[in-house]
Image (cartoon, helix red, strand yellow):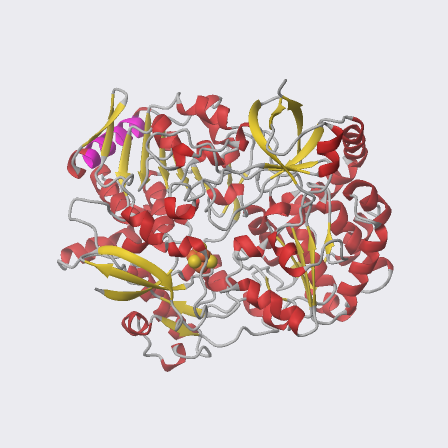
Amino acid sequence: MGYKKFNCPMCNAGCGLLVEVEKNKVVSVRPDPDYPLTKGYCCPKGISLGAITNDQDRVRKPLKRIGDKFEKISWKQALHEIADKLNNIRNSYSPHSIAYYLGTNSVHQYAHSMFAVGFMDAIGSKNMYNAGSVDNNNKFVAQNFLYGSSVVMPIPDLPNTDLLILIGTNPAVSNMSLVTCSNVMKVIKGIKVRGGEVYIIDPRRNETARILTKKDDEYHITIYPDTDIYLLLAMINIIFKENLQDDDYIRANTIGYGKLKTLIKDFTPDLAEKICKVSKDDIYRLTRKFAKIKRAVIYGRLGTCLSTFASLNAWAIDVLNIIAGKLDRPGGAIFGKNIINISRLGRIIGMGGFDSHRSRIGNYPDVMGAFPLGILAREILHNKNPVKALMISGGNPILSSPNSNEFKEALEKIELCVFLDFYINETANFRADYILPTRTPLENSNAPVYLLNYQTYPHLEYSNAVVGTEKYGPKPEWEILLSLARLMKVPMFGSALLNSIPKLYKFLRKEFHPEFFIKLFMFLGQVLEKKIPHLSSGTFSLKKLKEMDTVLLGDNEYGVLRKYIQTKDKKIALLNKHLKEQILTCKESIQKKIEELEDLDKNSNEFLMIGRRNLKTMNSWMHNVEVLWRKKQEPELFINPQDAQRLNLYEGEVVWIENRLGSIKLPIKITDEIMSKVLCYPHGWGHKNPYLSFANQHPGENINVLTDSHKLDKLSGQPVMNGYKVLLKKIE
Ligand code: SF4
């Protein structure tokens, strides 16, 4: 028996864990008190990694659907049959008739997403979809416009700021999501400890607000969902009107400033008050404070991402930081240090782009090579040359796609559906032809190099797999995809050069491993990034990293915009034609928005719906982990006491929630945590699935039967999953 060190790959935080293993079985998982970044902190998800690996419901052998059952088959049979079927579909229709959906589970395993993209390149299909399109692709779009690269994302300088404004984000349960900051709430609390301030703008007094603010104090500002853009533009407007902008910074680093000022002048604080339900006094006070405090930053996330003007929201948040002179400065929005300048590399190799091709349905641009999940069902149902085969790895789109019923209808039309997963999730139960078992996080070695740009405390980490898998058992996704590409006789990555690397290993009778690419990154880093400690010696290697587990790369730096920005003139492009068009669309929709909200006020049982997360879940999965859900807590629909009283509802009552797309029954929880006329229910539930035995006992409901696959942000294709209208009806 012994403890092995491991970094949790479930979210960006990468908490240090100690995993107790006996005879190749996980006995326990606990936080590692000696891990330098998290020092004994981790969330419940990290502790439960062992329970996932040991789960009896896991898929451990390839499965094939025969009749209405799944039967075990050999890897050889599974891979040959799938390769033949994919080739038949590719030859009978076109390469684009094969689509791939990469779920959230892929995000934190570098080789998973890299090889999925390589596999689609090998096939020659552009029909790639990912979970980022129901999460954060709007941010990548905004970054591309402003800085010329989707991977240049400023992060809040949390350890050094004096004023943090959080809009639509709840770090107490999301760990700040895209931003990599170990034990982030400790760091955020530190702002207040040193006399700084933290404002939370959210329709709900969320977990972060409950920790950081007192009830009804000024630091939690409620806002109607899907109205953020009116607030953000009003804030920009105030900065201009009151001459609070940083002229020197703007002159030196941006273009398009004058046009921007004119374009947004109608988005006034009065208008924002009317639409957002935020008092204009609060808007003025917050904006002035933000502009005047030197070390200040505004950061927005999911609440602002899943909305009508998602890309515009992400852009406006960055514009506030830019014009107020907070970008690239201590305590503001900064660029994370990386072992290699990934934005420059991306420009050279064509990665991190936007709009390199367009979807056939809806004419949506790709974001970093992927189309919006919201159009996938229509690509299957309505395209002249429809998708005929769908590969899904680490994803459960019936629960995470907008308009789940449409998605189900689409799945019934395809000829082949292949899953790479360690569970039979709801989507696989509904439609998988084959399920290829993959490894759980503890069974994979990992080095999260993709997170390096977003780190509050720059570091490199490496985790060895702590338990092994049996010879003909689960395999990593990259290995499965490489085998399929070989059997299909298509060149992995679609590039002769990259494809020659695994071939060369074979020729040398050496085992290929994607760690080759990490070594390549580190080598390039040593050649190009001479200032980074460890790398500067020129002798740092993956072998050394493995010995050290974690290597600190020194502090993030300021004044590095020119190094990372990829626009031709090295200036931030505050405006372009897409943004201008969206601002004008937003302006034209003002009257309609006001009327919609007036209707909301008039109709007693009409509400705006928002989602929420839970520290114990990872979107649609982890509900089968019994140790996390001992009390079988199914989610409840949050409703404000005023609304409950008006509609004569009692605690725990089950009500109908419906719109034109569907209806579901939900139990209510009456709480003043949520603002009046807003309802809140988390996504990712609805586990009516015998293959997840524990989750099946406390299924919850799938809220995405109510979200609309036609209501997508024009620029990123992100669906409106916050602030859509529903009706609440009593069950008589
Ligand atoms: S915060 Fe939780 S999920 Fe994220 S890395 Fe740490 S233990 Fe894992």
Establish if 52 lies above or below 564: above
Q: How many marks?
A: 0
Report the residue at 59% width, 33% height from top.
652
Q: Is residue 233 visible?
A: yes
Quadrant containing the C terminus in the rendered view: top right
Q: Main secondary structure of the magenta part?
A: helix
Q: Say if 267 sits above or below 508 in the image.
A: above
How far across and how far down the image is residue 384, in percent?
46, 21
The answer to whether residue 149 is seen in the rendering is: no
As drawn, 245 above or below 309:
below
Specify the quadrant of the image occupied by residue 75. top left
Magenta stretch containing residue 164, yes or no? no
Front residue of 579/444: it is 444
Instruction: Give coordinates of residue 680: x percent, y percent.
Output: 62, 38
Q: 367 and 166: which one is in front?
A: 166
At x 46%, y 79%, the residue is: 531
Q: What is the x, y in percent for residue 700?
A: 49, 33
Is residue 284 shown left or right of residue 115?
A: right
What stretch of residues is rendered in magenta?
78-91
Q: Is residue 85 magenta?
A: yes
User: In the picture provided, is 528 more to the left or to the right than 75?
Assistant: right
